Amino acid sequence: MRLSGNALTNFIATISATGGLLFGYDTGIISSALLQLRNDFHLDTLGAEVVTSAIILGALIGCLVAGGISDRLGRRRTVMIAAALFLVGTIIVASAQSVAVLILARLILGLAIGGASQIVPIYIAEISPPERRGRLVVGFQLAVVSGVTISFITGYLLRDSSWRMMFGIGMLPALILFVGMAFLPNSPRWLALNGQTEEARMVLRRVRATDEIADRELDGILENHDVQAPWSELAKPWVRPALTASVGIALLCQFTGINAVMYYAPTIFADAGFGQDSALLTSVAVGVGMVFATVFGGWAVDTWGRRTLLLRLLPGAVVALVVLGTAFAMHLTGGVGAWITVAAVMAYTIFNTGSLSVAIWLVGAEVYPLSCRSKGMSLVAGGHWGADLVISLTTLSLVQVLGAGWTFWLFAAVNAFAFWFVLRYVPETKGQSLEELERRLKNGTFAPVDRAAARAEAQAR
């Protein structure tokens, strides 16, 4: 039976999102494996941070390179290249006999993760209908947090076994992604951008309810007269509001502290007085919280809207971090205090993941014009991984210097800043076609601050 319409778009999004599952698993498994790696390789704090951060450096490089590759080869083939790198990196990391090989393997995995984070959301967004685009792209983030959760559960179950098994499990989804993508169509918008209009029409007719809807959508794509633009296009004033909103969310997604909790939760809790098993179980709870928050976010982005979701949930993240910082500052690691600490971590995870982590890949894939969408998304992913690199290299050191309490209070302040940033610079994209968003960029009514200025100018006249 040949799939079409919503069934086909669901299948495409599911297979593509396997890249997110690998993304989450390979970044999350280090938090559990690190407890064994420290002993096996005699790693000090700096060594642990370098092994953890190698994958982030690779991701930073991978996402910046992927933009040009996807423009030349197409979205689908770029995802397949990322899947191949996942396989190679997993084989090397699972058999590593030295710290140098371990770091090299993590760099290769990072290249794959960076490529997947750059191109999978674009591929899903460009093939999805406007009314379902939000939840389908958020499916990528759901796969990411599911991968993180699976890594935490795997780490707990294999805590007395080999860290090599923890890493090696990642080979199966890599194979599924590589083989699955070989049978999927290319992005209709990439095809249209490269002059393959009839091929684009055929793909759209397969993934839309009727041929009329598909033809109307193709007409809208062609009316914008997009041509492949150089990197310099992103610096032009008309594109700058998209750059500000998307890269701003990418940076804040990391600087608000979510990956600091994900990477180092077991280590931080163990150092604070929790036993190793309890610390690992706490990280599993964090992963489960991420999944539930992302499922909720997938519903909310198409019901409330992207911007509304961010503004409603970020204040909760601020409060949770203030409570968490206070719990650590007062050394509440036993009895009721321990439960307060765990509850605060869970609340922060839900509010932050359900807002910024849900929005980052969705907004990034939506806001850019087709002519430079792939390159713009490279900067979004680059901002995300660059900030992630800073966080992963400094979190343990920050906790040692400031203490866990002040560290979490600092993250609370960044979450409060994120609320202000969204209020001013992030537009609502719910229910609008990608071409409509491009027209708003061109007429200067994209960002909330720009629309407010336009209204004030009109009233003054």
Image (cartoon, rainbow, N blue to C red):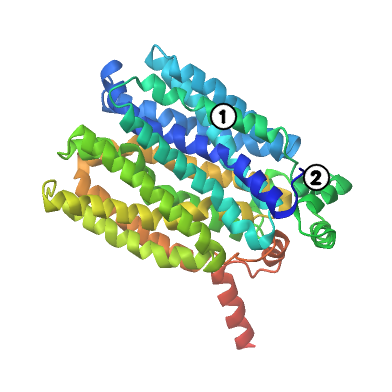
Indicate whether 365 appears above or below 391.
Answer: below
- Counting other residues with Cα less than 10 Å from the Cα at mark 1, is it few (<14), some (14-19), or many (20 or more)? many
Give whichever of discs 2 and 1 has the lower sequence position. 1
Residue 225, horizontal then vertical, whole percent:
82, 56
Q: Residue at x 88, y 48 (%)?
A: 198
Q: Contact (CB < 8 A) between labels 2 and 1?
A: no
Local SS, label 2: helix
Q: Which residue is mark 1?
A: 174
Q: Which mark is residue 191?
A: 2
The answer, for residue 393, to whether it is visible in the render is yes
Query: On the rendered image, what quadrant is the C terminus found in?
Result: bottom right
| Nearest to the observer: residue 91 or residue 169 | 169
Across the whole image, how many numbered discs are drawn on residues?
Answer: 2
| Nearest to the observer: residue 304 or residue 220 | 304
Q: Residue furthest top?
A: 97
Residue 384, horizontal then vertical, whole percent:
49, 44
Q: Residue at x 36, y 50 (%)?
A: 289
Q: Residue furthest right?
A: 198
Q: Which mark is residue 197?
A: none
Residue 43, horizontal then vertical, whole percent:
28, 21
Local SS, label 1: helix
- Counting other residues with Cα less than 10 Å from the Cα at mark 2, is it few (<14), some (14-19), or many (20 or more)? some
Q: Residue at x 39, y 11 (%)?
A: 97
Amino acid identity at mark 2: Leu
Choose top left, top right, bottom left or bottom right for residue 402. top left
Query: On the rendered image, what quadrant is the N terminus found in?
Result: top right
Amino acid identity at mark 1: Ala
Q: Residue at x 77, y 44 (%)?
A: 2
Indicate whether 274 appears above or below 435.
Answer: above
Residue 336, horizontal then vertical, whole percent:
13, 53
| 291 sits left or right of 115 in the view | left
